Image (cartoon, helix red, strand yellow):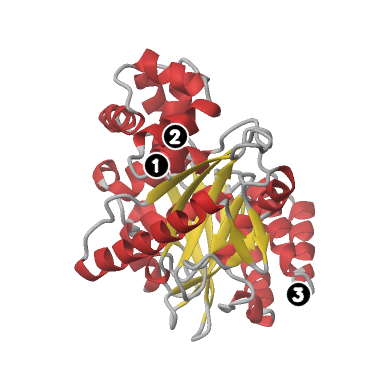
């Protein structure tokens, strides 16, 4: 349902100028635009070209897992980046005019990331471009939506001078800052308990779910700003963090992929203590691989699953447990709902062969061989996901 009325236009303009005093107000602006023109999502991003870092990211109908997946895996193969870099401030980039259906049908960025997220068509414009920050507004549309319609473009062009003025007057909101890192904001939005740590165990960030976890288990604590695990697990965890950092650095130097991005941690309470179990999955965030979104030093991102504090595993932990991409998570979820492969391909707007290949990859990563076996595994989540990940990980602590 779209609403391109004058009342909607005036409402969004008012929201735009409220952002001058409230950085968080941009979400309401994007939501207002989304309600006006429809489509898949609206996204506002900013980049610091001097640092090569993503300095701002906010959206309407954009899950934080999408941004995290882009930052960690797909930013370097995004074919739209080169097109956008040469775009002027006074024009729109409609990606389908440059990247046709033949290109899209074989491009891994579209087939593995963008289309599975429901975004075949992207129209974008620069709101600001300076040495400090380049700010981009993007409108994402599903395969079934088609490109941005002319009447929606007219509405956006009426808004654009107001958007550009607000961005220019509050440019400090979009400049890279160690006190307002994009990666930290995304982690804070996740429902899954997540901590960001230095490789030596110093706590950098614990999201709300992780802070709640500290109250419900004694298997992980924070003392003097450092993570504390039971003695049986502490040294081994830190050793694995150091080894993972070494692997990431070595892979970056040689231009090769990391053999295993995620490691797992399985802890149980010791004799004489109340029975307790905690699972962790951790990966290395190297600045050069994450656009500096988590800062300019390497960090460990540690996901937790505690049976008493979570009733479901979200896509972030499912990815951590089995190594599934977001696209593979969606295919697996639709399979669990009883949808056949051809219908999944139609629903996601991808080729049948793409879905079939994703299913084969899912089988391999989850150690299953047939759809019924995979569905049983998925229907038994969350507990079996963690247990299977631990069994499959020969280096589990």
Decide if residue 291 is on the left or right side of residue 363. Answer: right
Label 1 Cα crowd, 10 Å radius (few <14 / some 14-19 / many 20+): many
Disc 2 and disc 3: Cα gap in Å?
39 Å
Q: Mark 3 points at which residue?
A: 20
Instruction: Say which residue appears at 35% left-offset and 34% top-offset.
Output: 392
Does dot 1 land on a helix, a strand or a loop?
A: loop
- Cα–Cα gap, marks 2 and 1: 6 Å
**Disc number placed over residue 294 in the picture, else none:** none
Residue 105, x across and y down, in percent:
27, 41
Query: In x, y percent, where is residue 196?
Result: 56, 61
Seen in the picture, residue 194 relative to 297 is either above or below; the reply is above
| Quadrant that contains the C terminus | top left
Q: Earlier in the sequence, mark 3 or mark 1?
A: 3
Of circles 3 and 1, the one toward us is 1
Q: In this view, does 135 lie to the left or right of 358?
A: right
185 relative to 48 in the view: left or right: right
What residue appears at the point 79 percent right and 74 percent down from the top-left corner? Answer: 21
Q: Name the residue under label 2.
A: 329
Rate crowding at label 2 as few (under 14), some (14 to 19) or many (20 or more) other CA atoms within 10 Å.
many
- Residue 124 in view of the camera: yes
The answer to whether marks 2 and 1 mark residues whose Cβ atoms lie closer than 8 Å is yes
Based on the displayed image, in which of its 4 quarters is residue 26 positioned?
bottom right
């Amino acid at each position: 349902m779209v609403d391109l009325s004058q009342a909607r236009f005036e409402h969004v303009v008012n929201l735009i100028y409220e952002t001058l005093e409230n950085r968080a107000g941009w979400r309401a602006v994007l939501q207002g635009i989304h309600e006006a023109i429809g489509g898949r999502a609206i996204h506002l991003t900013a980049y610091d070209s001097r640092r090569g870092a993503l300095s701002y990211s906010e959206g309407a109908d954009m899950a934080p897992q999408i941004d995290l997946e882009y930052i960690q895996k797909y930013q370097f193969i995004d074919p739209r980046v080169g097109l956008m870099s040469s775009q002027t401030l006074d024009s729109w980039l409609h990606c389908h005019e440059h990247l046709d259906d033949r290109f899209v049908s074989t491009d891994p960025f579209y087939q593995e990331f963008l289309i599975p997220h429901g975004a075949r068509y992207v129209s974008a414009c620069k709101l600001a471009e300076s040495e400090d920050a380049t700010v981009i507004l993007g409108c994402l549309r599903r395969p079934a939506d088609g490109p941005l319609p002319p009447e929606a473009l007219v509405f956006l062009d009426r808004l654009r001078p107001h958007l550009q003025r607000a961005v220019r007057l509050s440019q400090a909101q979009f400049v890279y800052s160690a006190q307002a890192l994009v990666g930290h904001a995304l982690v804070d939005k996740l429902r899954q308990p997540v901590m960001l740590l230095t490789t030596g165990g110093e706590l950098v960030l614990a999201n709300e779910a992780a802070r709640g976890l500290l109250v419900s288990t004694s298997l992980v604590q924070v003392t003097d700003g450092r993570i504390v695990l039971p003695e049986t697990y502490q040294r081994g965890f830190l050793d694995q963090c150091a080894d993972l950092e070494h692997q990431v650095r070595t892979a970056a130097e040689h231009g090769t992929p990391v053999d295993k991005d995620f490691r797992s941690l399985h802890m149980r309470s010791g004799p004489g203590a109340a029975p307790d179990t905690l699972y962790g999955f951790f990966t290395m965030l190297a600045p050069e691989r994450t656009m500096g979104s988590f800062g300019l030093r390497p960090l460990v991102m540690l996901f937790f699953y505690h049976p008493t504090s979570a009733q479901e595993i979200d896509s972030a932990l499912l990815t951590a447990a089995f190594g599934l991409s977001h696209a593979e998570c969606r295919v697996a979820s639709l399979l669990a709902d009883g949808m056949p492969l051809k219908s999944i391909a139609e629903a996601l707007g991808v080729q049948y062969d793409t879905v079939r290949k994703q299913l084969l990859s899912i089988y391999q990563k989850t150690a299953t061989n047939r759809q019924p076996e995979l569905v049983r595994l998925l229907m038994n989540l969350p507990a079996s996901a963690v247990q299977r990940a631990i069994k499959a990980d020969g280096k589990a602590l």
